Image (cartoon, rainbow, N blue to C red):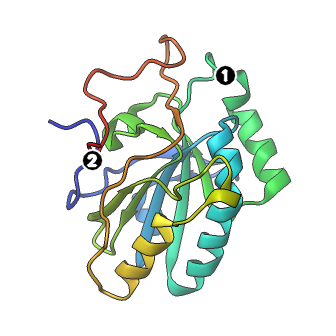
Amino acid sequence: MPFTLQIGKQAPDFSLPATDGKTYSLKDFKDAKVLVIFFTCNHCPYVIGSDEVTRQTADKYTPQGVKFVGINSNSKDTYPTDDFPHMVERMEEYKFPWVYLYDESQEVARQYGALRTPHFFVFDQERKLLYTGRGVDHPRDTSKMSVNDLDNAIASVLSHQPLAKSVTNPIGCNVKWKGKPPHWMPEDAVDLVKP
């Protein structure tokens, strides 16, 4: 079985605490025409470099019924700044337009097959996966960005058009797994698109 959730598969459910003090599961986003779930964190330079572009994409599509959910699955043992209190601080400072959930057990990251931060998953109204991979082609330095794959995917879904690309390789830091060296990845975690 592939590590990362395959196109056409259903979004795995979850029940995770958020920085706003609530606990969320998939049903809390049932009204969303499109649901974007992305694995992110506090410290990664690829996340920090592209968060404002992700914000712009969220702001652009939220009025059209798109909802964004950020999930931090990184082990705080690897990077202490990835812990929940720092998540709360980050959301208070930046006020991102998404809920920010903490996957401390890393179970949700495994169910989705999150490879890197950031790693985006775009689901339709039936919560079938239509796109997985990167947000943009230069997340660490978006001044070099030439394509926003996330924006393109959402636009295609909303207009009921086929996606030009349904799978790309996420670009970023690998997920920090508990009890493992910082750059360790599960054996079955592989690039989604071969060069």
Give the x, y percent position of residue 181: 51, 11
Label 2: how many residues lie within 10 Å, few (<14), some (14-19) or many (20+)? some
Residue bearing the label numbered 2: 5
Given residues 113 and 25, the one toward you in this image is 113
Q: Which residue is mark 1?
A: 79
Q: Secondary structure at mark 1?
A: loop
- Above or below residue 5? Residue 116 is above
Residue at 31% x, 30% y is 189
Q: Residue furthest left?
A: 1
Question: In this rendering, is residue 26 above or below 104?
Answer: below
Q: Quick one: SS at disc 2? A: loop
Residue 31 visible somewhere in the drawing: no
Which residue is most to the right? 93
- Classify residue 84 by image quadrant: top right
User: Which quadrant is the N terminus positioned in?
Assistant: top left
Residue 38 in picture, x, y percent from top left: 49, 52
Judge from the rendering whether residue 42 lies leftward or rightward of residue 132; answer left or right.
right
Q: Using the image, tell me which numbered label, if any, was put on residue 128.
A: none
Amino acid type, label 2: Leu
